[in-house]
Image (spheres, rainbow, N blue to C red):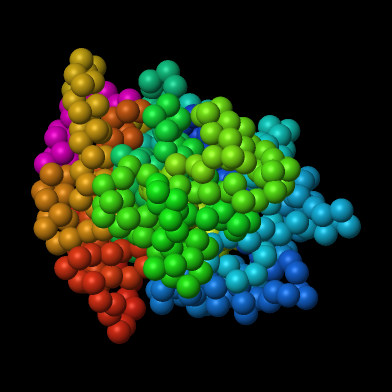
């Protein structure tokens, strides 16, 4: 099969991927979007809270937003990156409104600003409690109307094609990718630039708020291409995921506590006052760890999020989607406290990039959760994620356009995918077994509370599984399940090795062997040569 050619290959269809694709097409560039499920299957689509930005200058300021972000990040943020994103917040909200996004407003037409954990002012711009659905819906419709954008749904990226690795050139450069089609064939895509915007890695853990597509593909693909991973031990566990035997991965927005919801033990007693001055509005790392501590101490399966003291009509109007989801699970949040548990939610680390999405591999750009810019530090402030994703996408589109204007012509013909000597596998049970084992291992040993011994056990087991998967990968035809397992295992190893290098407790990384906080804040960096043979 001859290579498919495009100007820009965008891998991922969340907020970053869609914004960047639209802006690149508007610059006259041909864009190919590769997404391994439906175009709106992403964390962005599921986002409830909103976009944190300074919108009420009478009460708020860039300095306050900056201070809140730095406080949540526990000393590990890059202050320059924080300033970069905070100051561009109002402009990106205006840009999205111009695109047609309908954010919630008050009767006087002003934006209705939500209050979430870690914030000291109301500054979360939202669309009810389904902000992601509104954002992605508007962008998806615009993408489908754009004639310069081609969309490959149910296609899975395998690896970046770089000149150094695949063409044995002295100068490295991203020139495309191998992509598995929904029909099972591997297509060689030749691109003048590549944008990785694949989102997070929540599925590396047994319990997560993330959809099934969040298997850390971008981190794994970019890492194999030579981009270092930074602070990957900083995995944010959202404190409040609905605990219900029949309802999976239902996140209960930070805004529930922002509007007055209170965390309680099963016997109805509050407990957050013992862990943080902000009580139920404490940052996510503190709140998740507090809940985990209470569950272990009491032997309970869940704690309660109590909204029953709030006005009944306000609950229904402010949280219509969450109200319905709880009602479908047999819980009327107007009358019943909601059972909740923490679950893996967001990675504050990622592949090293500038805030504009540039990487150490020319022609390869990154945006959104896959990127590490320094904004989040050791813990993400609520609703800074969509802020980062949207701003990065806009900047990356400009950067890609500049790169294409300066880059030399196309390299020599790209090598086609080689399946010589491989066969169809009749042992899919191997993939399922290893998948389950990785997720259990990560939840039990590399979760909210860690120790040196747990991390050592996790690394030994993951290393064995990785070897099995590598053997499997090179001997059988690839499929989506195998590719996801290959990626999630590599990401798990990166997380474990990062956690082993951090000999302190800071932000989202808490270890019983090193409970104190180091006087100097340092990033942990894992490079390809550290773990790939």
Q: Is residue 248 above or below residue 513?
A: above
Magenta stretch encompasses residue 433: no
Which one is nearer the viewer's eye here, 307 or 253?
Answer: 307
Residue 273 picture location, percent across and down? 44, 67
Which one is nearer the viewer's eye here, 213 or 295?
Answer: 295
Q: Residue pushed farthest bottom?
A: 519
Which one is nearer the viewer's eye here, 369 or 363?
Answer: 369
Q: For residue 65, what is the image quadrant?
A: bottom right
Which one is nearer the viewer's eye here, 328 or 136?
Answer: 328
In this rendering, position of residue 505 left or right of residue 41: left
Q: Quadrant of the N terminus?
A: top left
* Residue that appears at 42% across and 18% down: 183
Is residue 185 visible in the rendered image? The answer is yes
* Residue that appears at 53% across and 67% down: 118
Principal SS element in the magenta part?
Answer: helix
Is residue 490 visible in the rendered image? The answer is no
* Residue that appears at 62% across and 79% down: 63
Q: Is residue 334 above or below residue 227?
A: above
Q: Read off the magenta span.
A: 464-479
Residue 153 picture location, percent across and down? 53, 28
Residue 312 picture location, percent across and down? 69, 43
* Residue that appears at 24% across and 26% down: 432
In this rendering, position of residue 263 left or right of residue 234: right
């Amino acid at each position: 099969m001859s290579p498919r050619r495009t100007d820009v290959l965008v891998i991922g269809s969340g907020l970053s991927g869609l914004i960047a694709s639209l802006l690149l097409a508007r610059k006259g560039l041909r864009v190919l979007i590769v997404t391994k499920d439906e175009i709106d299957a992403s964390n962005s689509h599921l986002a409830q809270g909103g976009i944190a930005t300074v919108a009420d200058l009478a009460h708020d300021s860039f300095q306050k937003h900056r201070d809140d972000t730095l406080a949540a990040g526990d000393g590990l943020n890059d202050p320059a990156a924080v300033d970069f994103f905070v100051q561009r917040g109002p402009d990106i909200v205006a840009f999205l409104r111009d695109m047609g996004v309908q954010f919630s407003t008050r009767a006087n037409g002003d934006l209705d600003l939500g209050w979430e954990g870690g914030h000291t002012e109301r500054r979360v711009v939202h669309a009810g409690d389904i902000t992601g659905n509104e954002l992605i819906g508007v962008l998806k419709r615009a993408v489908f109307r754009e004639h310069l954008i081609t969309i490959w749904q149910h296609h899975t990226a395998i690896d970046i094609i770089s000149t150094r690795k695949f063409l044995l050139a002295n100068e490295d450069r991203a020139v495309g990718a191998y992509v598995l089609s929904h029909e099972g064939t591997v297509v060689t895509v030749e691109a003048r630039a590549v944008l990785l915007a694949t989102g997070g890695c929540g599925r590396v853990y047994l319990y997560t708020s993330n959809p099934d597509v969040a298997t850390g593909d971008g981190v794994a693909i970019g890492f194999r291409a030579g981009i270092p991973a930074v602070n990957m031990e900083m995995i944010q566990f959202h404190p409040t995921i609905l605990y219900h035997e029949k309802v999976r991965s239902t996140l209960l927005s930070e805004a529930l506590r922002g509007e007055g919801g209170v965390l309680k033990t099963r016997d109805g007693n509050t407990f957050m006052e013992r862990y943080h001055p902000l009580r139920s509005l404490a940052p996510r790392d503190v709140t998740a760890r507090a809940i985990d501590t209470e569950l272990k101490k009491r032997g309970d399966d869940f704690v309660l999020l109590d909204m029953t003291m709030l006005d009944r009509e306000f609950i229904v109007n402010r949280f219509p989607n969450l109200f319905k989801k709880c009602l479908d699970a047999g819980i009327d949040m107007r009358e019943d406290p909601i059972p909740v548990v923490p679950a893996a939610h967001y990675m504050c680390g990622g592949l090293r990039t500038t805030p504009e999405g540039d990487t150490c591999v020319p022609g390869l750009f990154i945006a959104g959760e896959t990127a590490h810019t320094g904004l989040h530090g050791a813990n993400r402030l609520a609703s800074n994620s969509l802020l980062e994703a949207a701003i990065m996408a806009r900047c990356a589109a400009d950067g890609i356009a500049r790169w294409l204007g300066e880059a030399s012509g196309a390299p020599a013909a790209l090598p086609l995918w080689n399946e010589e000597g491989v066969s169809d596998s009749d042992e899919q049970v191997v993939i399922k077994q290893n998948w389950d084992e990785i997720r259990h291992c990560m939840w039990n040993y590399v979760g909210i509370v860690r120790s040196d011994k747990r991390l050592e056990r996790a690394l030994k087991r993951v290393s064995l599984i990785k070897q099995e998967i590598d053997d499997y990968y090179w001997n059988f035809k690839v499929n989506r399940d195998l590719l996801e397992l290959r990626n999630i295992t590599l990401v798990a190893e990166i997380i474990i090795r990062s956690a082993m290098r951090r000999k302190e407790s800071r932000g989202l990384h808490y270890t019983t062997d090193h409970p104190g906080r180091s006087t100097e804040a340092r990033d942990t960096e894992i490079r390809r040569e550290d773990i790939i043979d």
